[in-house]
Amino acid sequence: MVTGEIWRASWWLYHFLLLASMIVMVAGLIRQYASNRSLADAIRALYTSDPIERITGSISPSVKALMAATEQKDPYTAGHNFRVTMYALKLAEELQLRPDELRALAQGTIVHDVGKINIPDAILNKPGRLTPEERSVIELHPVSGYEMCRTLGFMQEELGIIRWHHEKWDGSGYPDRLRGEQIPLMARIVAVADVYDALTSNRAYRQAMSHREAMRFLKDWRGTHFDPGCVDAWVRLCERDASVYQYPSQVVTEEKTVPVL
C-alpha cells in the first residue's frame, strides 16, 4: 500500500475494497445494535461462531421475553424451538437464502410454537393419545401465536413461519389449508426442521426415533407433507456434515435449555 503507484488501477481497487469491507462491517454492527440496544452484545453477535450465540445475539428483547414465557410454560417447547431454529438456519443456508432472510427465519422460528402458551397443561403434556377435541385445541396454536406476535411488530416473513409451519405440501395441513408454493418458503423450511426434531426427541407418549428412521419418514412424505426441494436439501446437508443434526440434539436438551435473558 505504501509503495504502490496511485495511477495504477490495482492501487485504487485495493483501497476501494478496503473501504467497502469497513462499510459492510459498520453496517452489520449498526443493525445488530438496533435490535439489541447493547453495543457489547452487538459486537459479540457479529463475530461469534457459536450457533447458539448467533441466535440469541440476533433476536430482539421482545422475542427473548416470549422465549422466557415459553420455557416457563413447557421446558420441552423451549428446547424444541432452539433446536428447530438451528436446523432451519442450516437448511436455509443450504438453500442459499440471503442474510436478511436468515435473520427473519431465526426470529420467527425461535417462537414458532409460542401459541402453545394458551393451551391447557392437561392437553399440552398429556402422556397418551389426544382425543379429536384435544387435537383441535392443539391445532389452534399457530393462529394464537400469529395473533400474539402480530401486535408486537413482527415482520410478515416471521409471522408466516408462526402461522403456517404446520401447512402441508398437499394442502392437508392447518390452519389455512395452503398447498405447494402457496406456503411461504420459510414456513416450508421450518416444517421439515420441526418434524425432524419432533421425531428425534423423547416425549411422554413415545420414544425418540433414530436419525435414520426420521430421515426415512421425511423421504416417505416428500411431496405430500413436505416440500420436495426442502427435503432433498436436508438429506444432502446431513449426508455431507453429520454435525448439522448431531450438535443441536447434544447441546440443547429438555434438561439443559439455553438462557435467553
Image: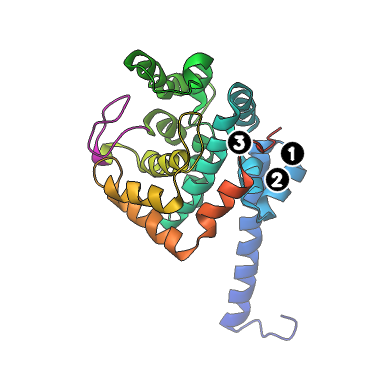
Q: Is residue 241 visible?
A: yes
Cβ–Cβ under 8 Å for marks 1 and 2: yes
Cα–Cα gap, marks 1 and 3: 29 Å
For the stretch drawn in magenta, the main secondary structure is loop
Horizontal side of 190 relative to 43 (left or right) equals left
x, y percent for residue 196: 43, 44
> Badge 1: few (under 14), some or many (20 or more) residues near its Cα, within 10 Å?
few
Question: Residue at 39% across / 61% down in the picture?
Answer: 236
Q: Which stretch did the figure color magenta?
A: 166-180
Q: Is residue 93 above or below residue 137?
A: below
Horizontal side of 31 relative to 138 (left or right) equals right
Determine whether the residue tagged by mark 3 lies in a helix, strand or loop. loop
Determine whether the residue tagged by mark 1 lies in a helix, strand or loop. loop
Q: Which residue is mark 1?
A: 38
Disc marking residue 254: 3
Cβ–Cβ under 8 Å for marks 3 and 2: no
Which numbered disc, 1 or 3, marks the residue that appears first in the sequence? 1
Disc marking residue 42: 2
> Badge 2: few (under 14), some or many (20 or more) residues near its Cα, within 10 Å?
many
